[in-house]
Image (spheres, helix red, strand yellow):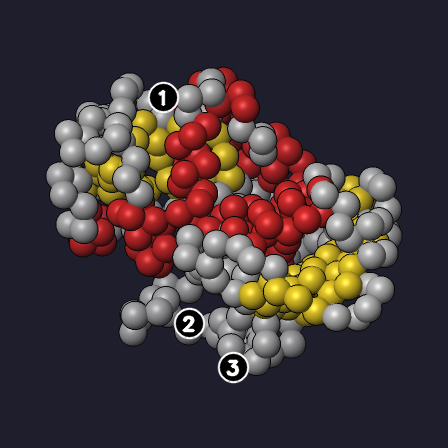
């Protein structure tokens, strides 16, 4: 399939949005609308009314409740998969079978077997396949990666991430008075705060340091909210070179409290990012000098959202998918680590916050 041609600007990539929920509607759709190289050609959702409401925001876009029809829309070249986790496999496989590039929300699936099958289907189809870890592309985080690579921090000793929110059982997305809070449904989500938020941190460590977490253990809590999955977690791990990593996530942190912080600590300095973890642009980044103790701001692009940067990166990779720096096989390996960390060091422990394929 070929790109659509925009007579008033550069060639545009035709996108199909699969899943018309909150993140697609409030974060991905604005990023696509603002991109001069993107065009939404179709929206598909089992709720046809929701698909139509989102499609109306894009001139010429059509709405469907059938995957095959949507992915065969003329001009379609890439699919953004934003359904609940348990449906990722079916949607991504249909997109790959239609020859579309796949950008699939995290985690890849609610069950490990489904995640593996999804990756295999994309590899078999030979399409560009990426997990939608938008935090990889937040301009502040890209700036951190540059500072680390330049050696400014000296020997990096630790990465500390705090990423939390308030998600009670009856939570509804912003701008909505009612909603289906599938993120705390054990079957459709595959877990709670841990499964929803910790994948971002695991991925981000690799993007910042150029090496992934290799061993980890996790503790989860069901402390505040009355639902079947965890409402908080902390993962402790290390990379192959010995960088210590802590990733604390929660659905039980009141949003008036500080809840988004990222620190990279080295022997010469420490980077502190505040309010960069999340879907929006901006936040702050500072460098603390180990010699003087003085703090100075680090400049970065505060206008570009991580979703907008992600769209740009995916579209650039379409010209040469082999150069995509984050293969899905690596993301699948991190998902296995996320799962295994729940029972690490505790023989016989059943990692119930993450469902097995049989349970899903």
From the image, state whether disc 1 or disc 3 is nearer to you. Answer: 3
Q: Is residue 117 above or below residue 256?
A: above
Q: Earlier in the sequence, mark 2 or mark 1?
A: 1
Q: Can residue 167 be seen here?
A: yes
Callouts 1 and 3 close, C-beta under 8 Å: no
According to the image, label 3 marks what residue? 256
- Label 2 neighbour load within 10 Å: few <14, some 14-19, many 20+: some
Q: Is residue 263 above or below residue 84?
A: below
Residue drawn at point x = 59 percent, y = 72 percent: 259
State the image coordinates of residue 268 (x, y, percent, origin top left): 82, 57
Q: Earlier in the sequence, mark 2 or mark 3?
A: 2
Task: Name the foreground residue: 351 vs 75.
Answer: 75
Task: Name the foreground residue: 99 vs 224.
Answer: 99
- Mark 2: which secondary structure? loop
Quarter of the figure with residue 79 = top left
- Mark 1: which secondary structure? loop
Q: Earlier in the sequence, mark 1 or mark 3?
A: 1
Residue drawn at point x = 15 percent, y = 50 percent: 56
Alpha carbon separation for disc pair 2 and 1? 36 Å
In the rendered view, does 176 fall on the left or right side of 156? left
Q: Is residue 220 above or below residue 114?
A: below
Quarter of the figure with residue 95 = top left
According to the image, label 2 marks what residue? 171
Residue drawn at point x = 48 percent, y = 43 percent: 132
State the image coordinates of residue 110 (x, y, percent, origin top left): 54, 46
From the image, state whether disc 2 or disc 3 is nearer to you. Answer: 3
- Mark 3: which secondary structure? loop
According to the image, label 1 marks what residue? 99
State the image coordinates of residue 146 (x, y, percent, origin top left): 65, 45
In the rendered view, does 68 fall on the left or right side of 240? left
Alpha carbon separation for disc pair 1 and 3? 45 Å
């Amino acid at each position: 399939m070929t790109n659509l041609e925009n007579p008033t600007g550069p060639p545009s990539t035709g996108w199909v949005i699969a899943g018309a929920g909150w993140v697609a509607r409030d974060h991905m759709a604005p990023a696509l609308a603002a991109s001069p190289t993107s065009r939404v050609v179709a929206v598909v959702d089992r709720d046809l009314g929701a698909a139509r409401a989102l499609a109306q925001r894009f001139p010429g876009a059509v709405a469907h409740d059938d995957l095959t029809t949507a992915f065969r829309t003329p001009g379609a070249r890439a699919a953004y998969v934003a359904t609940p986790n348990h449906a990722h496999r079916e949607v991504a496989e249909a997109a790959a079978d239609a020859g579309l590039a796949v950008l699939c929300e995290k985690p890849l699936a609610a069950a490990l077997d489904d995640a593996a099958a999804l990756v295999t289907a994309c590899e078999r189809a030979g399409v560009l396949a990426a997990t939608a870890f938008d935090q990889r592309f937040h301009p502040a985080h890209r700036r951190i990666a540059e500072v680390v690579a330049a050696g400014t921090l000296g020997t990096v000793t630790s990465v500390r991430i705090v990423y939390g929110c308030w998600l009670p059982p009856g939570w509804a997305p912003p701008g909505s008075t009612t909603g289906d809070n599938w993120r705390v449904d054990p079957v459709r989500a595959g877990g709670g705060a841990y499964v929803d938020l910790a994948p971002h941190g695991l991925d981000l460590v690799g993007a910042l340091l150029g090496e992934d977490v290799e061993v980890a253990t996790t503790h989860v809590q069901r402390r505040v909210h009355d639902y079947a999955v965890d409402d908080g977690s902390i993962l402790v791990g290390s990379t192959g070179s010995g960088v210590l990593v802590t990733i604390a996530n929660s659905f039980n942190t009141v949003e008036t409290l500080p809840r988004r912080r990222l620190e990279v600590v080295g022997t010469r300095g420490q980077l502190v990012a505040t309010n960069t973890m999340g879907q929006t642009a901006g936040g702050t980044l500072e460098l603390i000098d180990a010699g003087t103790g003085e703090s100075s701001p680090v400049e970065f692009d505060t206008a570009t959202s991580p979703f907008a940067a992600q769209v740009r990166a995916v579209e650039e990779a379409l010209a040469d998918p082999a150069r995509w720096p984050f293969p899905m096989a690596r993301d699948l390996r991190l998902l296995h680590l996320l799962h295994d960390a729940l029972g690490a060091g505790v023989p016989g422990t059943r990692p119930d916050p993450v469902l097995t394929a049989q349970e899903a």
